Image (tube, grey):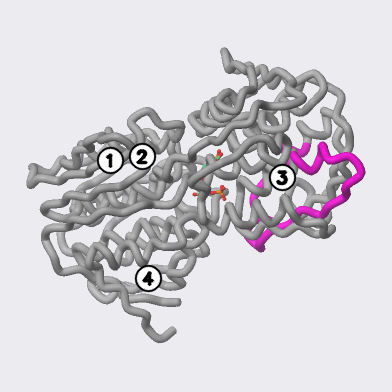
Amino acid sequence: MDIHISHSKKKISGELQITGSKSESNRLLILQALYPSLEVSNLSNSDDTQVMQKALSSREEVVDIHHAGTAMRFLAAYFATREGREVVLTGSKRMKERPVKLLVDALKSLGADISYEENEGFPPLRIKGKKLEKDAVRVQANISSQYVSALMLIAPSLPGGLEIKLDGQITSAPYISMTLEILQNAGVKGEFKNNKIKIQPEKELPSKTINIESDWSSASYFYSIAAICEEAELKLSNYRKTSLQGDSCLARIYEHFGVITEYLKDTIVLRKKPCKKPKRIIENLQNSPDIAQTIAVTCLALGIGCELSGLHTLKIKETDRLVALKTEMEKFGARVDITQDSLRLFPVKELAEGVSVETYNDHRMAMAFAPLALRIGHRLLDAGVVSKSYPSFWEDLDKLQFSVKTVAE
Ligand SMILES: O=C(O)C1=C[C@@H](OP(=O)(O)O)[C@@H](O)[C@H](O)C1
Ligand SMILES: C=C(OP(=O)(O)O)C(=O)O
């Protein structure tokens, strides 16, 4: 589905209920499979969570998780521990290009039986489930935090628990803390100190319902909308000031653009008042890579420069997000310089008209460029990609009076 998106109002107000965090949901689904006494509420309705649910209930040999990185990494660890079960864990064409070797090596060092069906180091994986007896492992933590979280999630189900030593500079660290806090909330004892994680074994966990906070990465698009329009008041429900999600740092970052967050009980209110624009934004996003696209496009819309660093993981996500951002922002007339781990946008006053934005099977490309419609109408190609994390995104924009029209492909 290709769309044309535009908006003509200067002031935006509305109330939205965004679906549950996909990161929290996919961790809790693995834990629930290991400990059925756990219940969850406000589970994400994203494709990534649906493929995880389907994979966990499937009895088939081939388990296909499409584009879902967390499902690939977390399920590789989970199936490695399922005695007597053999699966081929596969995914989309892009998933077969996303590396998984460091996790597979760590699992093999614990005794797992995993082999590559196509290319060494990449999915699909053939996994023959076994009882894993060892209780210590090392893993490199500078490529993806998902490898670490995957090991942590199976850790309490191993007979002696697990000590995980992290080598290298840790990337996306808040996601590791999120995994630990979710384990602790569920009743598992564990700690994370000085590059060492220790998780205690647990045969059973107490019956408990865990409520999932709504998704902060998805909230980023509304921060961007608030920043770009002249006045805004947006209420987003099921968000907390103390969040497990690192992307809640948005509230601080968007203050640079004049967006103030008020925390009510279980709801946030984003307000934008007319303000003086900053010259440029400088941020290291090593802890929150998923909001890089949102921030870059906010700056493009406002005619502000930005220097974003800590972005080395963007190259191995749904697409090479650094190249995708450069290509698409330059269509609007901007100059964008990228390196292996950074992006620099030079401000542009007049944005080009009649642009078609490619989305590269990447939900965040579509959602990050949508708020730009407040400055200039444009086309977004394959806009249905948003369902990876936020299936009702376009309906929610409609509630905020964006004009979203399907166009002939
Ligand atoms: O653990 C998680 O839920 C995630 C970790 C991050 O990945 P990396 O650790 O690979 O950067 C993030 O980009 C992804 O969207 C979700
Ligand atoms: C990178 C992402 O997801 P994953 O790695 O889980 O596919 C994302 O949602 O931006």
Instruction: Name the N-terminal-most of marks 1 and 4.
Output: 1
Q: Which residue is mark 4?
A: 380
Amino acid at circle 1: Ile
- Residue at 70% of width from left, 18% of height from top? 200
> Residue 259, percent across and down?
19, 42
Amino acid at circle 4: Leu
- Marks 2 and 4, Cα distance to the nearest angstrom? 29 Å
Amino acid at circle 2: Tyr
The mark found on residue 75 in the picture is: 3
Name of the residue lying farthest toward the front: 207
> Residue 340, percent across and down?
49, 43
Instruction: Name the N-terminal-most of marks 4 and 3.
Output: 3
Helix, strand or loop under label 2: loop
Helix, strand or loop under label 3: helix
Magenta part of the chain: 78-104
Choose mark 3 or mark 1, whichever is in front.
Answer: 1
The image quadrant that residue 180 belongs to is: top right
- Marks 2 and 1, Cα distance to the nearest angstrom? 6 Å
Helix, strand or loop under label 4: strand
- Residue at 20% of width from left, 63% of height from top? 374
Q: Is residue 254 left or right of residue 323?
A: left
- Marks 1 and 4, Cα distance to the nearest angstrom? 29 Å
Instruction: Name the N-terminal-most of marks 3 and 1.
Output: 3
The mark found on residue 268 in the picture is: 1
Instruction: Name the N-terminal-most of marks 2 and 4.
Output: 2
Q: Which residue is mark 2?
A: 239
